[in-house]
Image: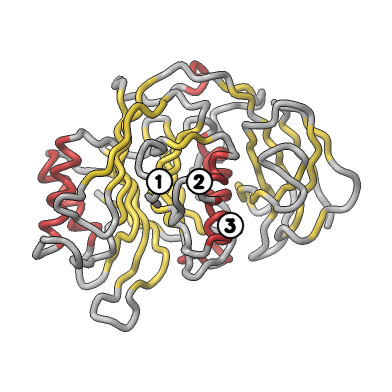
Amino acid sequence: MVALLGCGGGTTDDRTDGPPTDAPTDGPTGETGETTTEETGGSTTGDDELVVLSLNLHCNKLDGTPYATNRERFDAVAALVEAEHVDVLLLQEVCIGAEDATALLDDALSAATGISWEGGWNFAHLAWEGTPDEAQEGVSVLSRTAPSALVPFAFFTPGQLPRVALAATVDGVTFVDVHLDLDEASRTDQASQAAAAALVLGGVETVVGGDFNDPVGGPALGATLLQGFEDATSALPADGIDHVVVHRGASWGAVAAERVLTSPPVSDHPGVLVRLARRTPPTVTLTRLVARVDVGFGRQVSFRGDAPPLDWYRGLWAWPSAADRWELVLSEPSAPFSFKALRDDTDWEQGPDHAANPGDTIEFQPTF
């Protein structure tokens, strides 16, 4: 069963409201800032392998494929899902128009696997507007087991089209599905926001994947790596723009990655299949910064500082866990550092810099 979600298609009013009240806004770290595999748990399935498939479906377009109908190509996707025992699907350009891709996928997956898949869909924008292919386009996360939380959100930085993401927590792992913009500066900022949101929502047990519109070595992918994520698709050809990254502190690590659904193709994008295996990760110290301030409808809070991933030139967006609570979780600072909050990443807070040590939880009330 697919749950349809929405967050306003990228409008600012929904972005400032924060996640639903049942969303896991506190990561699995408690208040100590110290995270290990034993403390955070991980998958409760008992399996030692976690298989993730990221795929851009190219809306409901059959161009470039040998399939006569969308049901046929979704059957091909479902057949691979069953053959490779995929656990989680991260899908982009999932469209509802003359045909409903969410319903077709639900039917195809149920027929191929014998179970009803669970998850959600988040509306991004109207695609192919004014043509016979016009449809509502979104991103979707589907899994074999029901997510314990689904959190849709939109990106603060506008691009050529409204862009959104969807976070789903499945068996203790938070997956963030993204479809980033074509504009380089916009997609880099969106990737940075997605990684920051993932750390607030899921701590180190986090996977971010989807269509980055960014090749290996590109700045958008690099923005996630700067926040402690590792590229699980690094062994694939460097021209690929679809990626899956896993936090270096997660209890799952990448062991294999391959391009799939290319012969015959089901889309204008290859599918990216990643196999993760249980591992003993390094201990990661998390630092939580919390600005207690209501900056007003449609406005945001960012942080700048002197320890990567923070710098003094461009802010890292905080997560709005409430109208007057903006959180940022950092895994990479290893020494004392300084930071400040900004409104809309343009207006600096008044007063001196704040000081922080790795592992701190610092709550403060900035004045702009």
Disc 1 is placed on an element classified as loop
Determine which residue is flagged by label 2: 217
Q: Amino acid at mark 2?
A: Gly
Disc 3 is placed on an element classified as loop
Residue 143 visible, this orientation: yes
Q: Amino acid at mark 3?
A: Asp
Determine which residue is flagged by label 3: 17
Q: Residues within 10 Å of mark 3 (few under 14, many from 20)?
A: some
Q: Nearer the viewer, mark 1 or mark 3?
A: 1
Q: Residue at x 45, y 34 (%)?
A: 246
User: Is the Cβ of the residue at disc 2 closer than 8 Å to that at disc 1?
Assistant: yes
From what the image shows, is residue 136 above or below residue 197?
below
Picture quarter containing residue 31?
A: top right
Determine which residue is flagged by label 1: 238
Residue 122 image offset from top left, x and y in percent: 39, 58
If you read the primary sequence from the N terminus, does the residue marked by circle 3 or circle 2 appear first?
Answer: 3
Q: Amino acid at mark 1?
A: Ala
